[in-house]
């Protein structure tokens, strides 16, 4: 599954990506830079926001790295970001430490910039220092709110995990998230009604922006609850329990006609091939292969471009699900020795897990 967030570089070996919302904000700032008065200053503030968010996320990542936890990447958003870390085997106390590092760093930065703002209160420098003071405090305090997917939600859950199961801690935190969303919406309505001497378009912008944030929080909480339920339901299951053998193994000698017949008879469009010890996959189109011809000495193998991660049959299903999420892939090849014994395909496995969980809930209620 390809990411829609482009990588802009690496820091300490960690890829840094810009989320599309941040890209949109920077594009708007660039347009204002070349079309509006004061555009240079506004663009500079966006750059400062970028730096502040980056420092916030680096605090998470550095804390993780110092504790031997690998950081996959950093994704930057205007209201914060995400350090993609596999916390599957991390104890609650360490998760608490990693989660709180970002907000604390932002608040400390805000406190540092406050006296500088008092020393230089006027002019563009003073405005920039005021912005740095306010934005870092906002990043720190906002991300400490007890709701997913904010840092505060993970802080609260990791604290609750010391006395509750992961699923129960997640459910309690999701309830707190919903309360935060309701209070946030109420606050937005009160604020938009109370502010004076502003244009109607400004009021509309504030309401729209806050609704986007509320939706972001709601979707984040819903995704965390679903992942926790899947993780709990997958406990005790291995990938063998959920894998499918509905694929076709292709080699250099496979002819188009033979492949076409296999695809029709088996009803499968998932094709796998081994090249240089790696496994590659593609989804074939029956009609396309029916009329396809090739002249390369490698034959049909030249069509396989997408490498698929390999896992063992004995791997826990919860670990495989974490791997899919962290690595942003929707297909895993399952091996037993040198043989490809099956595949895990995300859409199928999540549908199967939903059925499995609904049956489990039905048994518990009866």
Image (cartoon, rainbow, N blue to C red):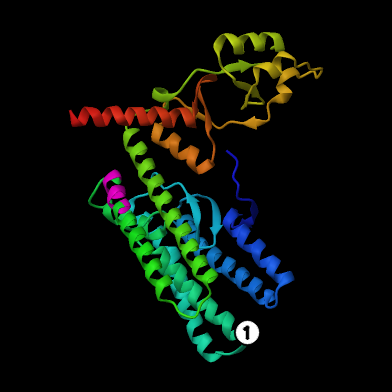
Residue 213 in view here: yes
> What residue lies at 50% left-to-right and 62% top-to-bottom?
209
**Which residue sits at x=60%, y=41%?**
2
State the quadrant of the C terminus: top left
| Secondary structure mostly seen in the magenta stretch | helix
Image-quadrant location for residue 284: top right
Residue 178: percent from left, percent from top: 33, 55
Q: From what the image shows, is residue 76 above or below residue 255?
A: below
Residue plotted at (32% across, 31% down): 357
**Residue 179 x %, y %:** 31, 58
Q: Give the x, y percent position of residue 34.
A: 74, 70
10 Å neighbourhood of mark 1: few (<14), some, or many (≥20)?
Answer: few
Can you identify the residue that label 1 sits on? 124
Identify the magenta region: 167-174
Q: Is residue 338 above or below residue 53?
A: above
Left or right of residue 301: residue 157: left
Secondary element at image label 1: helix
Quadrant where the image shows the N terminus: top right
Picture coordinates of residue 149 (x, y %)?
Answer: 42, 54
């Amino acid at each position: 599954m390809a990411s829609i967030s482009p990588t802009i570089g690496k820091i300490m070996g960690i890829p840094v990506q810009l989320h599309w919302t941040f890209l949109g904000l920077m594009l708007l700032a660039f347009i204002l830079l070349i079309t509006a008065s004061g555009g240079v200053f506004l663009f500079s503030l966006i750059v400062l926001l970028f730096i502040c968010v980056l420092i916030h996320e680096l605090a998470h990542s550095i804390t993780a790295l110092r504790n031997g936890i690998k950081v996959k990447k950093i994704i930057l958003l205007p209201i914060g970001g995400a350090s993609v870390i596999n916390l599957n085997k991390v104890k609650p106390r360490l998760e608490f430490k990693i989660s709180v590092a970002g907000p604390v760093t932002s608040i400390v930065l805000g406190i540092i910039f406050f006296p500088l703002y008092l020393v230089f209160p006027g002019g563009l420098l003073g405005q920039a220092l005021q912005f740095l003071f306010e934005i870092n405090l906002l990043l720190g305090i906002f991300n400490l709110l007890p709701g997913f997917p904010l840092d505060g939600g993970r802080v609260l859950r990791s604290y609750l995990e010391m006395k509750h199961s992961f699923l129960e801690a997640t459910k309690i935190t999701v309830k707190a998230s919903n309360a935060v969303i309701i209070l946030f919406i109420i606050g937005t309505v009160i604020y938009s009604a109370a502010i004076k001497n502003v244009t109607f378009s400004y009021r509309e912008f504030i309401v729209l922006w806050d609704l986007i944030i509320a939706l972001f929080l709601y979707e984040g909480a819903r995704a965390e609850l679903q992942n926790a339920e899947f993780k709990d339901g997958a406990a005790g299951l291995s990938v063998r329990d959920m894998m499918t053998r509905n694929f076709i193994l292709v080699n250099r000698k496979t002819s188009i006609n033979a492949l076409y017949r296999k695809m029709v008879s088996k009803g499968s469009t998932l094709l796998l091939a081994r090249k240089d010890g790696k496994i590659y996959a593609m989804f074939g189109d029956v009609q396309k292969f029916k009329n396809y011809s090739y002249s390369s000495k490698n034959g049909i193998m030249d069509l396989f471009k997408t490498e698929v991660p390999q896992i063992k049959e004995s791997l826990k299903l919860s670990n495989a699900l974490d791997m899919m999420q962290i690595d942003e892939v929707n297909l895993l090849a399952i091996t037993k020795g040198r043989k490809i014994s099956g595949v895990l395909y995300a859409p199928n496995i999540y549908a199967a897990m939903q059925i499995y969980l609904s049956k489990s809930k039905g048994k518990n209620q009866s």
